[in-house]
Image (cartoon, rainbow, N blue to C red):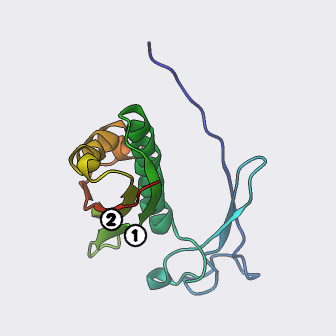
Amino acid sequence: MTKAHQYQTSLVWTGNKGSGTMDYRSYDRSYVISVNNKPDILGSSDSAFMGDRVKYNPEDLLVSSLSACHMLWYLHLCSQHGIVVLDYKDEASGRMTEKDDGSGHFTEVVLNPVVTITKEEDIEKANSLHEKANKMCFIANSCNFPIRHEARYVIEKS
């Protein structure tokens, strides 16, 4: 049985400096993403595209979404397979290629999780669960580029 899930967000452009988009340099790329009962996200375009480098850009959010979705599925799968995860950190990176006409697309995302588990003998199984997590991740399933995993493990007795 298939279940449908709905997600509702609100986006408001906050970058009108008074003359709107009169020309490419006349406006700011800032916006606010809102979801009911959650903190707002302040965004902009990447600084390479005249954005504010201290605000989240869509590319940051895409890579972060992949990293978070993967982690949540991975933790779920580890709990199902008796692998105790004590800590999980990821330094994910994405590569985007820009074309001459200004369009572009992601060519890959690499997840680099450092996973702390309790048993050294679980490393092989823990590693294999990354591929399954990738297959289960809703965000990864929506992408048309490869998502690689280069996991490292730390053993810490609980």
How far across and how far down the image is residue 5, in percent?
Answer: 56, 29
Which residue carries the number 2 mark? 112
Residue 82 image offset from top left, x and y in percent:
38, 36
Query: Which of these two is toward me, 99 or 158?
Result: 158
Specify few, some or many for label 1: CA neighbours under 10 Å numbering under 14, 14-19, or 20 or more: few
In terms of sequence position, does the residue under pointer 1 or pointer 2 come before the other? 1
Q: Residue at x 45, y 59 (%)?
A: 88
Which labelled disc corresponds to residue 126? none
Q: What residue occupies the far top of the structure in this picture?
A: 1
Answer yes or no: do the residues labelled 1 and 2 have beta carbons within 8 Å? yes
The type of residue carrying mark 1 is: Glu
**Up/down of 38 relative to 136, above or below:** below
The picture places residue 38, in percent across and down from the top left corner, at: 74, 52
Q: Image quadrant of residue 105?
A: bottom left
Distance Cα–Cα, label 1 vs label 2: 5 Å
Across and down, in percent, residue 122 comes to 27, 46
Res. 67 image quadrant: bottom left
| Residue 87 position (above or below residue 127) | below
Q: Is residue 150 visible?
A: yes
Q: Is residue 138 visible?
A: no
Q: Nearer the viewer, residue 137 or 154?
A: 154
Q: Which residue is under mark 1?
A: 91
Residue at left offset 45%, top offset 17%: 2
- Please determine whether, in this image, residue 56 is positioned above or below residue 110: below
Element class at badge 2: loop
